Amino acid sequence: MKENSNQDMLAFIRRLTTAMATARLYDVQHPQVSFLCQQALDHLQQVFLEQPSLSLLLVDDQLVFTNAPLENDLMVSKLIRALKQRGIGHLKLRAGVSIEELRQLISTLTAPEKPGQEINSSENIRFGRVEVHSRQEQDENTRELFQQFPELAQIEAEELDRFMDLYQSVRAGKQLNVRGLSEIVGSFVNAFSEQSNPLMALAPLRNLDEYTYTHSTNVCILNIAQARMLGIEGQLLHDIGIAAMLHDIGKLFVSQEILQKPGQLEEREWQEMRKHPQLGAEYLVNTPGIPRLAVITAYEHHLRYNQSGYPQVPKGWKQHLCSQMTTISDFFDALRTNRAYRIGMDLNKIAAIMLEEAGTALHPLLTRNLLKAVQQLDQQGQFDLADQPN
């Protein structure tokens, strides 16, 4: 079904971009534009049979649809270029979209650019600006995105205890309780959705002793925060949280002596440690009810943005957006948390290290997105990274 949706989406984009080219040659009311809009709408209706609405996210130079980047052919590249030229990072279409609304979309994407010109959404086609900008004049827009971040302080410690029980069951050779895990992630997602205090999403990251469990919880919170900054909602947001909670599950199949070793690992030990992404993915792919996204993320979360990490993958491999977000969340929480071999770092040092790794180990735009959030929270005195427990 997903493959069919992707093919229909690509067909929609082909008709849309052809209609845009026709509108530039003639005008948006030309009969050929109407004909192409009807064809585009026919393909959209096929996608809407599977879901009542759909989103296209522009991240870096990729157009993301249903969890993964679309194949970047000529027509997709043309749409990406048109979206970027008008500062559009998020396009949401709902099942009631009409030919007239598609015509308005074409008009928006082909009209001459005017500085400061507003882009108006329609009832069933919504535009969003989710790109990360470093320029000072964009700070206000970024600040508005942060207002989505709710307070998670009310989430009870029992959620962590439940997660620890799930992990202990897996370590004991029992099957993962997918329903219990889904309920835990659902509590985080609901807290994000129901509260409205700015920037507080990242404040209650836990710092208890059980590192494997609390680290996974923290990465889940950070992933949900990142995904909401991109306008991701619904089942995909939930699956991204599940993927984060399970990204390190392969470590349950690595010896405790290696995991808890206070000094540097020897080469033999590193070889065993590097197996945990594949071990985790193999375990999850054989677990009924686990989202495919969690399998991919477990496998790819140490791959690095430039694919120089592990495991080794074929040339041209495209790391999933969720894996990239998880790598950033994983990296951030690992630096801020006390470990057996070092104490947690302060925010300035973490930011310097992550910015140094942006473009190599880490996705550069997503990295800056997360750092903007935690830096502003730190300035408000709500997120003191230097105050770590012993």
Image (spheres, rainbow, N blue to C red):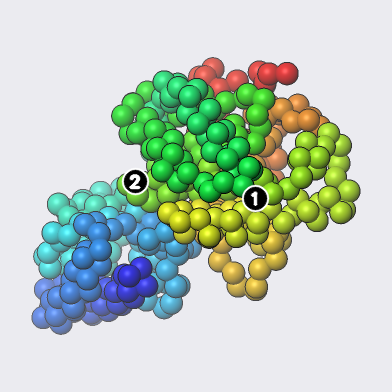
Could one spot residue 358 in this view of the protein? no
Which-is-in-front pick, marks 2 and 1?
1
267 on left or right of 213: right
State whether residue 333 is above or below residue 197.
Answer: below
Residue 259: image location, x then y, percent: 76, 40
The three-letter code of the residue at mark 2 reads: Glu
The count of marks equals: 2
Residue 260: image location, x then y, percent: 78, 36
Could one spot residue 3 in this view of the protein? yes
Q: Secondary structure at mark 1?
A: helix
Q: Residue at x 37, y 72 (%)?
A: 3
State whether residue 112 is above or below residue 328.
Answer: below
Estimate the spatial distance between the alpha carbons at disc 2 and disc 1, rounded to whole Å: 27 Å
Quarter of the image for the C terminus: give it.
Answer: top right
Q: Nearer the viewer, residue 27 or 160?
A: 160
Task: List the residue tagged with mark 2.
Answer: 233
Residue 36: image location, x then y, percent: 19, 78
Q: Residue at x 25, y 67 (%)?
A: 47
State whether residue 243 is above or below residue 373.
Answer: below
Q: Quadrant of residue 29?
A: bottom left
- Label ID, residue 232: none
Q: Residue at x 45, y 56 (%)?
A: 288
Q: Residue furthest bottom?
A: 32
127 on left or right of 144: left
The three-letter code of the residue at mark 1 reads: Gly
Q: Secondary structure at mark 2?
A: loop
Task: List the residue tagged with mark 1.
Answer: 250
299 on left or right of 120: right
Q: Quadrant of residue 378?
A: top right
